Image: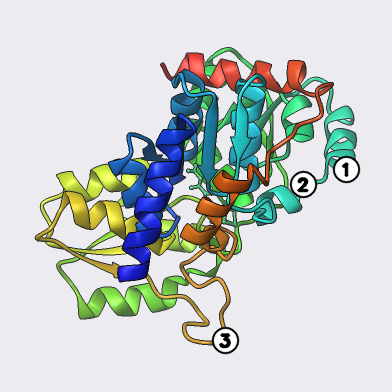
Amino acid sequence: PEQQAHLQEEVAAELKRQNAVLVAHYYTDPIIQALAESTGGCVADSLEMARFGSNHPAQTLVVAGVRFMGETAKILSPEKRILMPTLEATCSLDLGCPVEDFSSFCDAHPERTVVVYANTSAAVKARADWVVTSSCALEIVESLMDNGEKLIWAPDKHLGRYVQKETGADMLLWEGACIVHEEFKSKQLADMKSVYPDAAILVHPESPESVIELADAVGSTSQLIKAAQTLPNSTFIVATDRGIFYKMQQLCPDKQFIEAPTAGNGASCRSCAHCPWMAMNTLERVLECLRKGSNEVSVDPALIPRAIKPLERMLKFTS
Ligand code: CIZ
Ligand code: SF4
């Protein structure tokens, strides 16, 4: 702990010296989230990370999260220097949606509007009409549907299925999944609920449909944090990355938060309620990228003019 405190001070000093700002996702280590807060940066979901980064005057952003978050920051602010604690932190949704296959899929359905989740590569975003995150997907799809548009949705099939069910939109779904949320199991969740009958169940819609069906509140990370604050329950079973407990506990110190069960709880499961790529963001690596100016994010300049359009549409729609 003493060493951690020392590292935190060093990062804070380095951020100041370089006039840089730390932008962290809710799924990163609580130590990194606390540091982002105490140094004038932000802790948020991917939508608000993107907005904060593009609005902030700092010329250097340190993005603690996964690769697509750093790329999004670069696309929105090509003139800024974007550093990441690691460039190896990817996402199973991004990996499961290679641009060549995705482009062919889109080409086969030219009459459909292409909506992609933020968890995708810059090249996939460049092929899209809209980028959405889980906190604005329902509203954006609803408005496209009101406009009479038929959609292609990629890459998360569970979130896609959920949005389709809620809105009734005509959507062709890509077959991607998040390795963290896909592990939540409805049978075990129902068993846990019987042990905590008064608990409210909070579920991120990247989870399987059978898990979503048991939820008292379904939503993005920021929406689940809001539900934890507004629902009257004192106990919550939470089906998303456990990194979110930092913010929930901070805002609701008297409430109890329990991790929703996964099939492989224990040593056998690499991704049980915690994203292995988010976990690659350590305090040591935050300091190292700042000191060395290493792990600078680059995006093919040829992609930026096309990738920025669907991102800016999303930011404008939600502003
Ligand atoms: O699972 C993710 O990567 C999420 C929830 C991203 C986001 O929208 O903040
Ligand atoms: Fe991707 Fe899932 Fe990790 Fe989020 S939690 S970055 S969706 S693998």
Q: Between residue 159 and residue 297, name the one nearer to us.
A: 297
Does residue 74 appear left or right of residue 269 in this picture? right
Location of residue 278 by image quarter: bottom right
26 over 139 or under it: above or below: below
Identify the residue position indicated by label 2 in the image. 97
Q: What amino acid is found at the position of numbered circle 3 in the picture?
A: Ser
At a point 34% along the width and 48% down the height, the residue shown is 35
Q: Residue at x 63, y 47 (%)?
A: 292
- Residue type, mark 1 in image: Asp
Mark 1: secondary structure: helix
Q: Position of residue 311 (x, y in %)?
A: 61, 22
Q: Which structural element holds mark 2?
A: loop
Q: Which residue is mark 3?
A: 268
208 sits to left or right of 186 = right
Q: CA distance from mark 1 to mark 3?
A: 32 Å
**Percent of width and height locating residue 296:** 68, 40
The label on residue 101 is 1
Q: Which numbered disc, 1 or 3, marks the residue that appears first in the sequence?
A: 1
